[in-house]
Each structure stands twice: as C-alpha cells, then as structure tokens.
Image (cartoon, grey):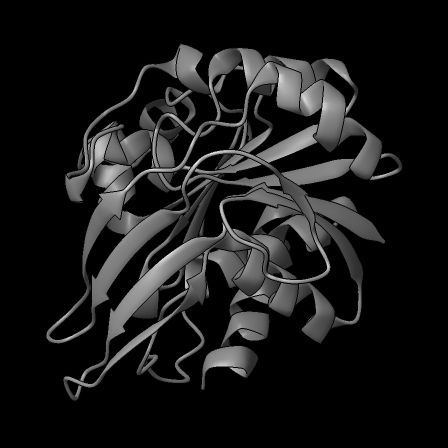
Amino acid sequence: MRIGLLGHTVIDTVVGPDGGESRRLGGTPLYARRAVEAIGEECVVVTRGADPGNAVVIPGGPAYESRLDHRNGTRQVLTRFGLPFSAADVEKYVLPAVAGCEWLHLGSQGASDFPPETIAALAAAGHRLSLDGQGPARGSEPGPVRLRPFPPEAIAGVAVIKLNHREAVASAGERLDVEALLGLGAPEVCVTMGADGVLTATSDGVVRVPGTGAGTYRDPTGAGDSFAAAYVLARARGVPAAVAAAQAEAATDRLYL
C-alpha cells in the first residue's frame, strides 16, 4: 500500500518542556513519512521550502518557519509562510510523482497552502484526499496561531479532514455532533482529543474511540502528522473509520512513548 504525502517542510524552533531549545526540520513530509515507514508501508513525498531527503521538491519561495513552545502545553507562532501549492504545481510536479497512489494526505500549515483550485485539481485526477484541518483553521497570516472557522468551500473535494480538539471547536463550535462536524465540508471528520481519544464522524454518526491510556507525549511535535498518516493508511486498506482511529492512536504511541 502506497500513499502520497504533500506539504511544506518547515524549519521549526522547538522549546521542550524543560526549556531546552533546538532548531530542526519539521512538517508533514518528515513526521508523516516516519510514521508510514514505521508501519512498514511506502509513501511518496512532495514538498517545498526545504529538502527533507528522498522527496520531490517543488522549487521556489522561502521555507515556512515556526516556533513551538511545549512548556505548560503547546503554543505555536508561524514566523514565516511558504508559497502555496498551485494548480500548476499539481500538473507539473505532484501528479507525475503520485501516480499510482489512490490516497493523498495534504499536510497544511496555513490556510493558503492548498487553495480550492489545487484541491479540485487533485480530486479531478482521481485521488482521494485527506487534509490536516489545522491549516484552514489557522488562517493565512504570520504570527501566534489563532484558530477560527473556515468556509466549507475551502475544502471542497476533500474526503477526510483531521483536526485536533481545539481546532474542531474553533471551526465547528463546542457541540461536536454529526451536523456540526460534517458541516465543515468533508464527508468524514477525525478529531483527536489527546488522552480522551478520538471522535470520528461520518454519515453513520459520531463514534468516540477511547484513548489508549498509555500516557502523554513529552515532545508531541509532529504527533498529529504521524496520526494522520497512520489513519490514512488504515482507511486506504478499507478499515472502518473508528477502527482506523484506534490503529492510528496505537501507531502514534509507538513512535512517541
């Protein structure tokens, strides 16, 4: 089973719980690929901004830069945005690279990363799309991350959207029922809730998948990307959404605990 991973490689400055600071590459291409390889499957990475190695790199533009502070929770500042992935990028770079991949995961950092015409071009080529909803929920301006709602048309053509709990509440409201979650614009929604587990929403309703009880991650940088990749792999195998969420939780625990 091979999936495609599309997203910016980010230059992260990470402050750990003990105050130690490091500067390193991050973003979906790095963390999602690590999860795919740990599961024993294959992926194709298409990125821009920096080269994480063994990837198709789209030229042009500065790299995203981000500062993550994990002291007393996680706070993030997007200090610089990268260029969007355009429909022209899709035709020239992405589609040739991901030929044969039914599923693609789009690891958005900000709302400008995947414009509607880009999503439409990928969907029109026959790919099933998973999107990290953190991008649409963050907006398009540098600075401290501020979550907000986004219009359903921004993600038209996406089969699955993945959010964390804070992103879901900011986007859909406090009552995370079927109507609110599917109103975001995708027919399948996956909401990670930390130790409280995962919510999956489809036309069949909302299913709550309990947490693993294995503990919290000391440095959770990239855990959402890892979970999303494991979830997409399971869905690509035909595993039901709630079971895919449980499998993705376990796979992420193995990487982070």
Q: Where is residue 71 shown, x and y percent of the image?
A: 13, 76
Q: Residue at x 49, y 52 (%)?
A: 9
Q: Residue at x 28, y 33 (%)?
A: 137
Q: Where is residue 79 shown, x and y percent of the image?
A: 21, 47
Q: Residue at x 48, y 25 (%)?
A: 114
Q: Is residue 174 above or below residue 75?
A: above
Q: Is residue 168 left or right of residue 156?
A: left
Evaluate whether residue 146 shows in this view: yes
Which residue is at the front of the view, 147 or 44?
44
Evaluate whether residue 210 shows in this view: no
Which residue is at the front of the view, 186 or 20?
20
Q: Is residue 148 left or right of residue 131?
A: left
Q: Tell how many labels.
A: 0
Q: Residue at x 32, y 38 (%)?
A: 81
Q: Is residue 37 above or below residue 106?
A: below
Q: Where is residue 14 shown, x and y percent of the image?
A: 27, 71
Q: Is residue 47 above or below residue 85?
A: below
Q: Where is residue 256 shown, x and y percent of the image?
A: 46, 80
Location of the N terminus by quadrant is bottom right
Which residue is at the front of the view, 148 or 53?
53
Q: Quadrant of residue 34?
A: bottom right
Location of the C terminus by quadrant is bottom left
